[in-house]
Amino acid sequence: MAWKLDAAEAGFRQEVRDFLDQALTPELRTAGRRCSGIFSDYDDGIRWHRILAQRGWSVPSWPVEHGGTGWTPMQHYIFASELAQADAPPLAPNSTRMVAPVIIAFGTGAQKQRWLPGIRNGDDYWAQGYSEPQAGSDLASLQCRAVRDGEHYVINGTKIWTTHAHWSNRMFCLVRTASGGKAQQGISFLCFDLDLPGITVRPIVSISGDHELNQVFFDDVRVPVSSLLGEENQGWAIAKYLLAHERGHAWAPLLRARLRRLREAARAAWPHSDADEARDMALRLAEADCAIDAVEALELQALRAQVQGEPPGIRPSMGKVLGSELRQRLTELGIEIAGRYAAVNLPLADSLQGELPVPEEAVFSMSAYLNDRAASIYAGSNEVQRNLIAAHLLRG
Amino acid sequence: MTTDTLQAEREHTLAMLVDSLSRYLGERFDLDQRLRSLAEATDAPPAFWSGLARELGLLGAALPEAQGGLGGGMAVHLAVMQTLGGALAGEPYLSSIVIGAGLLQRQPGVFSAALLADAVEGRAVLAFAHAEPEGRDERAAVRTRLVRDAEGYEIDGHKAVVHAAPWATHLIVSARSSGEPGDAEGLSLIVVERDAPGVQLRPYALRDGTRAAELRLERVRVPAEALLGREGEALPQIEQALDEATLAVCAEAVGVLRRLLADTLDYVRQRKQFGVAIASFQVLQHRLADMHMALAQAEALTQAVLEAVDGTADERARAVSSAKVAVARACRAVGQGAVQLHGGMGMTEELAIGHYFRRATLIESQFGPAAWHLRRVARLEAQQV
């Protein structure tokens, strides 16, 4: 369904569209369409980020004094929707939406000065050091250790699922600086460069055949004490603040864009729309469409609440469960529309065409299906989110 | 011999067959070896294939005794496919033996007898070139043309995602000498040598690691003897071959899903979070229970349908579709559940389950997704009224 926009909002939408018409090149749109996971290929993603930075739109949700746009929540929503509909390469969340909000909330003046400009203009690219092989859903049991030694912390241990660590020059990392007591106590939040001696990055190839994930090893890595964000041993509060931001983003804009592609693919698959199969699929796509309306309505409600200064409460957990599962549902429809070509394992490239062509959308559909199995695992598994929602309800 | 002892003897033979196959695969074909041999198998079957044919001699076990087999029929195919599924090794047994040899064994004549003998001894590998780019899953949606002339036949057309074609020596091609795509009449089956002039392949890997190809047939000349059965009357044979193949992948799925469930049970027992094994969390226990029930139904129904394969074509179609629906649901429930319960590790190439999950995902839609089979059940039920 279409949301009613007032004149100012409609004008803003036109401004975004005009910008995209000239700034979002066909190559970037192709890159956006071929992004089957959460992260664009590094080159395309950072190129697009830098173009947005020149326009002043790379970090719209930041406070204005650090380079944010001061938009209304509805403007943010319009912006995200227009980018998704235009097939813009998705922007990596690690720097702009994960570490930056905590630097803004917990960092010193010097730290903000040191880290925020590089994120805003796209010179820096951050990796997230949260999970460990033995600390996933139970994040607080993390064991990667940092020991104070004069003006340095010395880090030993490992982090896993560090998306794009092989492209990143900086990392934010949860480390254990004290033991004994509750697991949540004794955790600190460090930010440092990834080219330091003693850091090794091991690639992890995913079931889609893509290399986005890594494991990072620390062997006596010395980082200056100025790497510490907030207080020593008080990092758990920062970690949770960041997770709420990670989970709190809007899902509906991308879901709508994906649905539009599914409809195009279905029209190509069944040129005769009265075929039984076409009618069955149309009904299932309509069901997904209505489900997106419902997710979107909840997200717009959350935006309004945010303007009125209400705390996010349990909304980020609800959004994560509903958004990620609907995203997965769309990929299930995608492989069904793709039919037998969904089985083909070829790189998404212009070479799919040629004399005996293989439809690119079909090959994409399976990459998306496989990659999006992670959506119910990352950023706090959906089992954990449901526990949080239930606990919230039962607290009354 | 009484029927009971005959039955007991058959079951004994089948058990020995499965046992020797399992041992062979276990000893010579672990996951790393499988990946290596598949990576190398660009234009010939993977290394394990010759062992199946020559050392185990099991490729002909399903054939009637009169054709040099053990007379095991579909029961053998299901047992073999389930075992191969457990080792992710279903192809090219599925294409060359279940479909290829299945089609040939029902054809009289010297030509098909000779090719059948080559196939069960592993000298020939067959691929079934039937589906077309625009055809979806309707079995009569064939556009490829077949023209008869004084010297034989000429074929022109485009076949889509032909499984095992890069490994094949021969293609069994469906083609139309009359009518329009979708018409039941006018379809024929004909054998084409894969390297015949006018046959163009675009080979590629599939997500399960096997290989397939797009196929262009351009003025391909074939001798008249290569026609299987009567010209224009092949649809019933095609239907039977595809129903048997569908049931075979149902059995393969049972092997694949058992492994996924077993690995998941192991994982949740040993993985600790919050100081306890994650198997102790009720929400995960319920998911495991659902996975198990989906698999149990798929397995039971696949075996039950075995008896319906010899019934009328409609009975067979109805039963096979039901099994495929149960299997597709089980592939999704067990496959997605296995990945979810493995957490991030389930998303990687580093454990076996990622590989099994992809095979399960491809089986879901192979020979028609659940929605196609549901429509077929609805159509058949409507005819009953």
Image: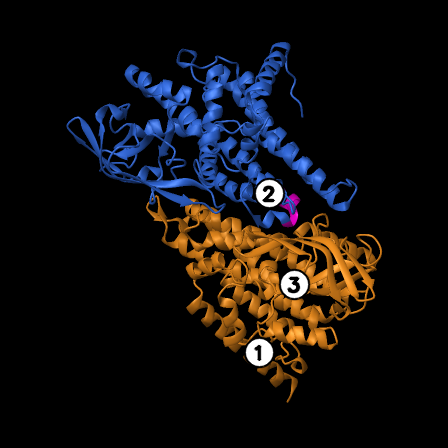
Q: Quadrant of the N terminus of chain B?
A: bottom right
Which residue is more in the foreground, B125 or A181?
Answer: B125
Distance CA(mark 1)–CA(mark 3):
22 Å
Q: Residues within 10 Å of mark 1 (few under 14, many from 20)?
A: some
Q: Position of residue B271 (x, y in %)?
A: 37, 50
Q: Residue at x 37, y 35 (%)?
A: A165
Which residue is more in the foreground, A206 or A104?
Answer: A206
> Considering only vertical position in the picture, is A63 above or below B190?
above
Q: Position of residue B30 (x, y in %)?
A: 43, 63
Main SS, magenta residues? helix
Q: Residue furthest left?
A: A150
Instruction: Identify the residue position indicated by label 3 in the image.
Output: B245
Q: Amino acid at mark 1?
A: Glu
Q: Colour of chain B?
A: orange
Instruction: Identify the residue position indicated by label 2 in the image.
Output: A352
Q: Amino acid at mark 2?
A: Leu
Distance CA(mark 1)–CA(mark 2):
48 Å
Q: Secondary structure at mark 2?
A: helix
Chain colored blue:
A
Colour mode? Answer: by chain
Q: Secondary structure at mark 1?
A: helix
Which residue is more in the foreground, B73 or B318?
Answer: B73
Same-chain status of marks 1 and 2? no
Query: Can residue A283 be seen from the camera position used here?
Result: no
Q: Position of residue B274 (x, y in %)?
A: 34, 43
Query: In the figure, is residue B236 to the left or right of A130?
Result: right
> Considering only vertical position in the picture, is A69 above or below B2?
above
Q: Residues within 10 Å of mark 3 (few under 14, many from 20)?
A: many
Q: Residue at x 55, y 54 (%)?
A: B360
Please give the range of residues in magenta. Answer: A331-340
Q: Chain of mark 2?
A: A
Instruction: Identify the residue position indicated by label 1 in the image.
Output: B11
